[in-house]
Image: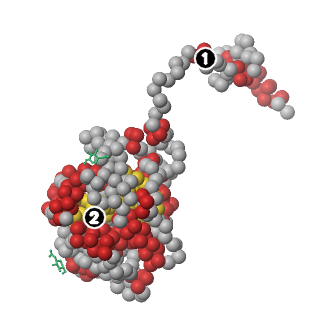
Amino acid sequence: MFLPIVAAVIALPLSGAASWHDPQKVLSPTKPPSSFIDSSIFGRRSIAALNLRTPEVLPPTRDSEIHQFQTLATFAHLDFTDCTQFENSGTFDIGIVGHPFDLGVSYRPGARFGPNGARQGARRMSPASGWDMDHGGVNPFRNWATVTDCGDISNTPFDKLVAIHELEQGMRAIHKLQAKNVSTSDAVRLITIGGDHTISEYTSTVLAGAILIFHAALPILRALHSTWGRVAVLHFDSHLDTWDPKQLGGGLTKYSEVNHGTMLHIAHEEGLLSNHSNMHQGSRCTLFDEHFDLDNDLRCGFSYIRARELDTLGVDKIIKRIVETVGDSYVYLSVDIDVLDPAFAPATGTIEPGGWTTRELMQIIRGLSDAGLKIVGSDVVEFTPIYDNAAETTGIAVAQIVYEILHWMVSRLTTITVLLYARE
Ligand SMILES: *[C@@H]1O[C@H](CO)[C@@H](O)[C@H](O)[C@H]1NC(C)=O
Ligand SMILES: *[C@@H]1O[C@H](CO)[C@@H](O)[C@H](O)[C@H]1NC(C)=O
Ligand SMILES: [Mn+2]
């Protein structure tokens, strides 16, 4: 059965190709090894013969030993803390919290997988190699703050209002914890990874501590409210998300009016937001109406910078305009990943072409941090990993934005604390 092939090989030199030789001869060692293992790189070598010295220094610490693609994925290989447990009070300063929730979406579902998608996207980061050449060599994981991965807040996929209630209860429990570094921070600060954008509503609610739709305010939240007051929401998003519930999904039931396009309207009506200093950045959506949406947006206390204005204003002028608008207010930063162009963040629920690049967004966030805006909390939402590509483009961008926000929190907490203590 092999005969025709052999015949062909033998036939070649005869038909005129004089330089051709049998490759088998080149590969054949002159003295064949006695066994495969002797000739392979796994051959029976003596370690002693290599003359290695016994190490005098102990092996590296746990996290520098971690290779970034290995181990269970916490965010950036941070330690895990079950942050809703009161016994963990005083053990961390900044927590990364997952909200696996997507019952409020209007288009593509799947943001419930966002928190773990972001952890996967953050695998290449690690406290052991977190020093940042764009931030003067600061490592935000190894600065004054102990940063931890709080895991996810458990919530039911079967009922939206119950799920929101569960997430809210979890956030309240975490906000009751004392920070670890009490000399710098009197409260823990959280960066929430969504989840669809509905979560911001009660996330900022918990921070502002005002009355919720579903719950009367607890004393602890009143205390928080008297400290923070109304917060200015900096909302990076291609959409407005201040839609009147009667217009978007609502007008049906109490259940339908709470969704990822109405939560800022509801937050405004609950008195959680600053009256005038909230802003959208990167807006570029279509509207339901010629006038109503934008009038309503203004009523909710928002102004906006459209995505395309970046080309005429540039990053510096955008930063300047935001700083002038926000002034001295406490800032809640909400980043809907759809603010980025789909080229940079394809995996999101409600996609809009024509957005910013990851680098532009990072530069703007950096500028707000440098300007000293007082960030009290943040979220990055609407990452829907099932639409990501094999290169994990969106997940990696989400992780990078969280890292940028972390830099801001680490650099600005002192200022906030001084103010807090002054008020007490
Ligand atoms: C607490 O924060 C301060 C800076 O505000 C820092 O100097 C100090 O080292 C921190 N403490 C700990 C235990 O990390
Ligand atoms: C903001 O608006 C509320 C409700 O209209 C009002 O009570 C409050 O005085 C306003 N605050 C400022 C600083 O204008
Ligand atoms: Mn949004």
- For this orientation, the residue located farthest to the top is 30
- From the viewer's perspective, tell me whether residue 177 is left or right of residue 134: right
Which quadrant of the structure image shows residue 115? bottom left
Residue 376 versus residue 256: which sits nearer the camera? 376
- As drawn, 396 above or below 264: above
Q: Secondary structure at mark 2?
A: strand
Q: Which mark is residue 48?
A: 1
Q: Nearer the viewer, residue 338 or 332?
A: 332
Residue at 23%, 68% (x, y): give it: 227
Identify the residue under disc 2: 332
Would residue 121 be visible to someone looking at this image?
Answer: no
Q: Position of residue 155 (x, y in %)?
A: 49, 70
Disc 2 versus disc 1: distance between alpha carbons?
Answer: 60 Å
Mark seen at residue 70: none
Drawn side of residue 200 relative to residue 374, left or right: right
Image quarter of the C terminus: bottom left
Residue 297 in picture, x, y percent from top left? 25, 76
